[in-house]
Structure formats: C-alpha cells, structure tokens
Amino acid sequence: MTRHKRKPARAKLLRSLFLWHRHIGLASALFVILLALTGLLLNHTDDFSLDSRHVQYGFLLDWYGVKAPETMLAYTAGSSTVTEVGTQIYWNTTPIPQVSAPLLGTVETHGLVIIGVEGQLLLFTPDGKLIERLDNSAGVPAGVQALGRNAAGDLLVKTAHGNYQADSGILKWHETADNEINWAVAASPPPALRAALQQAYRGTGLTLERLLLDIHSGRILGSRGVYLVDAAALLFLLLASSGLWLWGRHHANAREHRRMRAAATTRLK
Amino acid sequence: MALVLWLLLTVAANTPAEGVDQEPGAFINEVFAGNPPAPEVLWITRSMREPITEILGHNPDALRVRYWGEKHRTAWILEEIGKERPITVGLVVENGHMETVKVLAFRESRGWEVRYPFFTDQFKGTRLTGENELDQSIDGIAGATLSVRALKKLARLALYLHNQTPMTNDSP
C-alpha cells in the first residue's frame, strides 16, 4: 500500500525534474553555442591570425571607446604626408610597421623621402617603398632632434652636439656649420586626411582575439557580463547534475522493470 | 661601501638596454677590430627578390641592404621577426662560410635561448647549398621554434647576400 502511495509522488518529482532539466537545457543552449564557437576560434588564434586582425565595425569600436588622438603632427614630403597619430606613424593613411613615435621630421632630398624617428632614419622612395632603415651602426649621428635640408638639397640633422650633413646616398655623415637650413616643420594634417587617419587609427585599436576573449568571458558587457557567464556556468553544472541524476533513475527503473518482467515470466512457466 | 657602490655603478654602466645585448655599431667595431671599413649598400635587384623571398618566406621589406666588407669578409646587421617582434642579428661571412652569428637585440617574450653561443655557434662554418639551404643541420630549441627559424633564415640570407657582393670574388 505504502509503495502505491510513494510511486506517484516520485513519478511526479521525476517528471518535474525532467521539465526543469529541459528548460535549463534550452536556456543554456545559446551560451553553449557562443562559448563553444568562441572557444574553438580562440584555440586556433595563430592559425586564424586573430591577434593581428582588427575589428573595423564602428559600433564595436565605440563600445570599446577606441578613439583617435586629437593631436596629430604631419610633415609633407613631395606629394605624400607623414603623420604621427598616437604612437603610430602613417605614410598617408598606411601605418609604417615597426616604427613608433616620436616623429622627428620628414624631408625629401635627392629623390628620397627621409623620415626621422627616435634612433632611426627611414629612407623611402617618393611612392612609399621602404629603401632602408638606418641607425647608429650606419653612422647616423646619435640624438637626432630634427631633420632639414640645406640650399643644395642635402639632408641635415640637428643633434644636441651640432648639425650633421649626409651625402646624397645617405652613406656618409660629417659635421657642418651651414646656417642656411630649412628644418622640417610639423603642421596639422588637412581635414580629409585627418578623418581618414582617425578611421585608420581606430581600425587598429581592437583585435579579433580581444573581442572573442571578451565574448567568451562575458567582459564585453562589463562586470555584469562576467556575472552572466558565471550564471551560465552554474546552469551548465545544474544541467550536468540533473542529467546524470535523471539518467541514473532511468537506468535503475529499466533494471527494475527487466527484473519484474523476468520474475513474471518465471511465475507463468 | 665604496666597493658595493663601485660594483653597482659598473653593473649599471655595462647593462645593455632592454633586450639589447650589443649595439650594432659596437658589433661592427668589434668585428673589424676597431677599424671598420666604410659601409657599402647592396641593392636588391629584381633577380635577387625571388631567392630572398624564398629564404625569408616573405618579400624583402627594404630595397637595399647595408654591409661592411673587407677583402673576402662581409658583416651584416639583419632583422627578422620571430613571432611578433624583430630580432636584430649581426652576421659575418668569410669566403662564403659563416664566421659569426650574434643576436644583438632580442625583443620577443619567448625563445631568448637563441641568444646563447651554444646555439649560435652551430652556424659557424656553414655554407649555402645550390638550393640556398644551409649545408649543416642546426639543432632546434624546444619552445623557441620561431626564433630558431628566424635565425636560420637570417644565416641563409647573409650567406646569399655575401655571394651577391663584389667581396665574394676576392681570393684569400
């Protein structure tokens, strides 16, 4: 009699648990898909070059607060403009790799465009192809502060200990007392270039890897997003526990059912 | 106290900048015993671009390379990215074989073991085969695969570039 009373209650509990398991499963599905996809991609960061690819969507860059600096220093050399934006140096709107601010000046001389940054002079063709990077091993005077040209169009650099002049191939340097020097002067870039540079600078501010990591951890929504992913993780634990428990009950019931059927068959025989 | 102060000052004076083991200028001076020849430049011609691209695995990033040469010996300061940041290496080639490989500046966060002589000494005496490969095998370092690869590329490049200079025709 007792057995008959307990069985429906247990069945009701099982049914209720099964329904909850299903609802939790449905609620977790979105998180599982999101975490699995982002996890898969992050596992292959190198293969997909996620750390060197950048997000270009304006709303995401706004969400992350990626802004271009207001102050930009531009030097014009021939038909090109070299600009310092933040720590990056741009040839028109193309970032120059492995070079960082401060930009000391840019001059065009003897068919070459020379860009001066701290510790280096970069030689470019007028159409923007890098010819060579020069540092102190190539005889570039130490502590360059500014770049300029003399009346003959030769390259000169200003240092704390004097001015130095290069030959036309920028191979040899000698100290000079030449006073007629036009030092390169920085200006603000034209409005159209400024807008393009702002877009270009913002476009390098957020890597795909960062975005995926933040989606994976929930940080894309701030601290609340982290709690949301925490809640999802708890749901997963609940789902796994209820699933295991239901599977166990189902397994036990099936075993009992088989045992009872075997006993009934024996009695009939 | 004075001794401690002297030691501190000596160490501070001799400590290279972050990641820099030796300044390129100092390397060139050392290689030519304090009397380096005037630098020369080697322009990367169209016929040289293909083998260089094959050696580096990417297009050369400059149109000319500076070197210092004397008789049949040339010295090069070359750079290649290991994983993310350039490794600056000084290389000396004599008579078509590698004399010295020295890491001058290492800026990567991993793979710094390539700076040590136990690794760089393996390049001594290596030459280029007809396919622009090194004629000796170089043992790798676990955890420094990309840095090792970068140094192998630069060794092949220096040997190749040496063969393009007038110094290669000089007899000893």
Image (cartoon, rainbow, N blue to C red):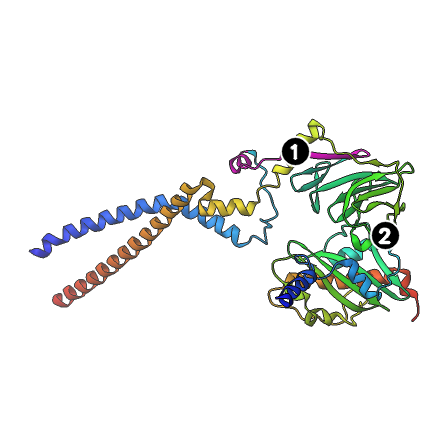
Position of residue A132 measured from the top left corner of the image (x, y, whole percent): 80, 49
Q: Quadrant of residue A90?
A: top right
Q: Quadrant of residue A80?
A: top right
Q: Residue at x 86, y 38 (%)?
A: A149
**Which amino acid, mark 1?**
Thr
Pick the residue in front: A45 or A138. Answer: A138
Position of residue A105 measured from the top left corner of the image (x, y, whole percent): 77, 39
The disc placed on residue A71 is 1
- Which quarter of the image is occupied by the C terminus of chain A? bottom left
Few, some or many C-alpha atoms within 10 Å of disc 1 (few <14, some 14-19, many ≥20)?
few
Q: Residue at x 86, y 61 (%)?
A: B36
Q: Quadrant of residue B127?
A: bottom right
Segment tinted magenta in the rendering: A59-80
- How many numbered marks appear? 2
Name the residue beneath numbered marker 2: B45
Along the horizontal axis of the image, is B12 left or right of B131? left
Camera-nearest label, 1 or 2: 1
